[in-house]
Amino acid sequence: MNNQAPAPLLRAEGIKKVFFKEKEQIQVIRGVSFSIQPGEMVAITGASGAGKSTLLHILGTLEPPTAGKVFFGPEQQDLFKYSERALSVFRNRSLGFVFQFHYLLPEFTALENVMMPALIAGHARATAEAQARELLGFVGLSHRLSHRPSELSGGEQQRVAIARAVILRPKLLMADELTGNLDSTNRNNVMELLARLNQTTGVSILLVTHDLELAGKMHRVLSMKDGLIVSSTEGSAPAH
């Protein structure tokens, strides 16, 4: 009988990040180790300058660590042994990103913005469009398909960005302050949307936020201070 625990989806081991400003060495991440299980929702909180966004960028392979390793998937592949080209393919297939600023392409409609990652990945246009329409329906924007970003509210723009981030069915959705520019109504809409995505698709979620109420809706909350994780507490989300 095999009682071995399942492999984590993502595992960080001894992550450190040092920046150099002139001759000064600035330690932003001082040695972070933790893991995320498949289907788990995890929030990272902490004051500005604690290292949250830098850690997220490293875990998302957007920048390399100075030291330490990031492992991913059942085989626990060491991501920073990949070539830049292989990392780009990995990010496109396995990760979704949403940021505080939605980065929608202003000249394209909501539908076209959501389709874009699927088209870049080589999906047939008809397939990409069908997937985008379904996702925009899921996020409550079926009536806004032909609207450009400038014609959408901030909350609608962020929901389009979330739909775009998950069109390729990533295993992990990574978000950086995605409710930072939203009013309370749109913030609550986004919180509910993340929970529904997790429950219906099984996507794991890792988000960096100052929003303690949003963080508390996750399965687990990690608190960072001075480049270290200093505490881990359970959130209010039902066990996955």
Image (spheres, rainbow, N blue to C red):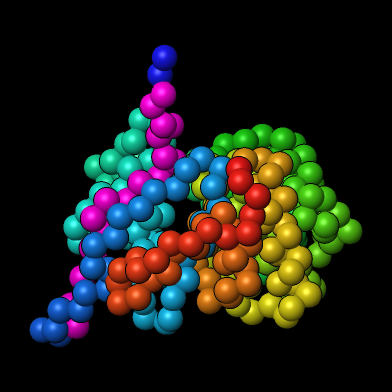
Q: Is residue 18 magenta?
A: yes
Residue at the right extreme of this rendering: 143
Say if 183 sits above or below 38 in the image.
below
Residue lying at 56% horizontally and 43% vertically, measured from the top left: 39
Whole-percent x, y for residue 8 in the image: 42, 40
Say if 201 sits above or below 145 in the image.
above
Residue lying at 69% horizontally and 77% vertically, measured from the top left: 182
Range of residues picked out in magenta: 3-21
Residue lying at 23% horizontally and 68% vertically, measured from the top left: 30
The answer to whether one can see residue 150 in this image is: no
24 lies left or right of 124 = left
Question: Which quadrant of the figure contains the C terminus?
Answer: top right
Q: Quadrant of residue 98?
A: bottom right
Dominant secondary-structure state across the stretch colored magenta: strand
Residue lying at 76% horizontally and 65% vertically, measured from the top left: 189
Whole-percent x, y for residue 62 in the image: 38, 58
Residue at the top extreme of this rendering: 1
Q: How many marks?
A: 0
Question: Which quadrant of the figure contains the N terminus?
Answer: top left
80 lies left or right of 24 = right
Whole-percent x, y for residue 142 in the image: 86, 54
